[in-house]
Amino acid sequence: MACVKSQQCSVWVGTETGILKGVCVSRKQVYNFCEMRSLTRDEEICTITWGDEHETEVLIGSVNGRVKTFSTEKGIFTESRECADLTHGRFTGIAVTDRSLITCVESGLLKVWPEAGKETVEINVGGGVCRMKQNQSEHHRVATGGKENPLKVWDLQRPDTPIFIAKNVANDWLDLRVPVWVRDIAFLTHSNKIITCTGHHQVRVYDPSCQRRPVLESKFGEVPLTALSVPSGENSVVVGNTHGQIAILDLRKGLVRGCMKGVAGSVRGLQCHPSLPLVASCGLDRFLRIHNLQDRTIMHKVYMKSRLNCVLLSSKDLQQCVTDEDKQLEEIKTEVDEVWDAMETVTEKSNKRAAQDEQEVQEVTEKDKKKNKRTKE
Amino acid sequence: MDFVEVPVSEDASCGNTKVKKQKNGKKRREKKTENIPEEPQTAEPTDSSLPPTFSISDIKNKQRRHLMFMKLKQEKRKQKLQLRKKRKQEREALGDKAPPKEVPKTIENQRIYDETTVDPEDEEVAFDEGTDEFSAYFNKLVNPKVLITTSDRPRGRTVRFCEQLATVIPNAHVYYRKGLALKRIIPQCVSRDFTYLMVINEDRKVPNGLVLCHLPDGPTAHFKVSSVRLRKEMKRKGKDPTDHYPEIILNNFTTRLGHSIGRMFAALFPQEPQFVGRQVATFHNQRDFIFFRFHRYIFRNEKKVGIQELGPRFTLKLRSLQKGTFDSKFGEYEWVHKRHEMDSSRRKFHL
């Protein structure tokens, strides 16, 4: 049964209690993929990502330093490996290249785990890392950033030096240094730019081919921004903050296009659908919400019982996953219809009634006509 | 006098004409009914000077309007009484067979269903609550120790309010703020084994806010405080409370957020109450307002209980719940009250 369930799910959510949750949006059902008895707090899920391109595997990084592989086809955890110590802090990002796994932890230790046998590559990207993200078009490039740790882009084929280090913005009007605190990063694949959002409520766009300082900076709200995601089209960005405000910012001038309503607590995870105008958000208020990006209405809202840390959307249509099941249901329905067709119908009484009704209706219409005539006169 | 009288008479005549007109209108309407309701549409435009229905607010004379209104009110009241009497009689006539009384509609029992309402058998929520920040207290590993302080330079009632709170909460210490920053107080509190930091904010000598911060690692709740009544201002209050640990009552904390808040209040007081003191502290949640009362009770006989309020009393309303210790700038909020988004329905409650 489990495998049927997991195939239906189109949204995956990692929780603070260590449960991986799959949500079947069209049926409004939530499935827990976990042993409920063996729950512990140190299995809290920090990051979640797809394990392969066909989206049959989900990779989960938990607080205790294990990376687990969950198969969406089988509906079970297939693999689990130790990738970090507790002393290094939580996972800030995991990613997959052709054959190897990339992990990054808070202390700044970025590791590349090739498949069996080969030695791991270790890079120290600097302490206080808040996020590591992979470039979706060039898988061997990753970006890191964190508290007092500026945005850096690494080429994993040449791991010695970063290929891009962001330069801090100019001092402020009191000639004081502006603090650095990158909270989330995203690559713009079309224009080769990088977007970051910071703990000091700035959204910055970097263009590595042009200069080291941001080419665009805009501010949203007054509290730290925690997550960001770029919708398809890449001319806007969705950001969320610790007060539960989600906004769409335009990337041409950095202005707010609109805000999403209905979020009560800090946003921890944001993801836009790769093709549809949808954005999924989750956070400390224990709700998964799916908003429409065009009219900003809330489309789905699911209560998940635990605080949520990260969200993962599948690239297929949210409703599509159920069609197979529906087909089966339809077949059953047609059978039922046949039974009904085979039955004889009892018509007499109902006919009489129907006739009466018709008469009444006629009378009424005649009256109406009269009225209309009078009014015309 | 003439000057006054004339307009009155005019007005009176005016009123009369109105009444007449109204009568005319009635007659006309009767006529219309004779004609069978076929031509209301044609009739209306000709009679547009007359209001189709008579309403009291159309009377221009104020005295007369008032009079008519009183009459109308009386009539309505009479009708209502009659109806009630009739119903009562029917009820008595039917005796036992009478249908059960209708429950009046209130905004509480018409409450919009909240999907976060906690099911006591839910494994996941039980696990979540069993391992949260208060689990140490509920597993009887720590004893609560509370530090009460105020915003800087408290005046008037706030000081007394703090003192009285300290008599309600056992093991509470009131400290003068001395202009210290909360972020610097918190580490000191943690090192001295305090489990709660309570900050009362005042505005123009009136306590209006309460920050309740659980230590060592949160959460922090921010409440609005209103209708504070100190012991001195209360009628029929009992003698001053004793040092015994009170019992606590938490009412109506049903949703997931409500549970967290309820647990927060529970962890303020020591786990095992001393029943000798016969004192009870109540946190009653109604329509998202939390009412605090402090009573002493006595069992007079097997059926009767006497209670005596000891005070203080106050009302709290949750503004936000923040994860971690107090950090209003960089802290992550678990729940923030957003008035225009959340208070769209009067029947929606969050606690």
Image (cartoon, rainbow, N blue to C red):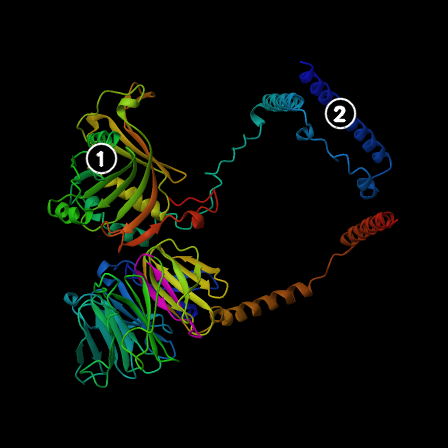
**Residue annotated with mark 1:** B154
Give percent across and percent down for residue B256.
Answer: 35, 48
Q: Is residue A161 above or below residue A178?
A: below
Q: Is residue B154 above or below residue A271?
A: above
Q: Quadrant of the N terminus of chain A?
A: bottom left
**Residue annotated with mark 2:** B19
Give percent across and percent down for residue B91.
Answer: 59, 24
Q: Nearer the viewer, residue A72 or A97?
A: A97
Tell me what residue is drawn at x 69 percent, y 19 percent.
Answer: B8
In which image quadrant can residue B62 be found? Answer: top right
Which chain does tag 2 point to? Answer: B
Q: Which mark is residue A89?
A: none
Marks 2 and 1, how far apart in space?
Answer: 65 Å
Query: What residue range appears in magenta?
Result: A222-241
The tag earlier along the polypeptide, 2 or 1, is 2
Q: Is residue A225 magenta?
A: yes
Q: Secondary structure at mark 1?
A: loop
Give percent across and percent down for residue B160.
Answer: 22, 29
Q: Nearer the viewer, residue A313 or A336?
A: A313
Direction top: furthest residue = B1
Q: For the residue carrying disc 2, how many other residues have a C-alpha within 10 Å: few (<14), some (14-19), or many (20+)?
A: some
Direction left: furthest residue = B192
Tell me what residue is drawn at x 34 percent, y 51 percent.
Answer: B335
Q: Nearer the viewer, residue B86 or B78?
A: B78
Q: Is residue A119 magenta?
A: no
Q: Give, as a three-letter code, the residue at label 2.
A: Val
Lateral position of residue B172 relative to residue A182, left or right: left
Can residue B341 be seen from the camera position used here? Answer: yes
Lateral position of residue B252 relative to residue B164, left or right: right
Can residue B293 be seen from the camera position used here? Answer: no
Q: Give, as a three-letter code, the residue at label 1.
A: Pro
How many numbered markers are drawn?
2
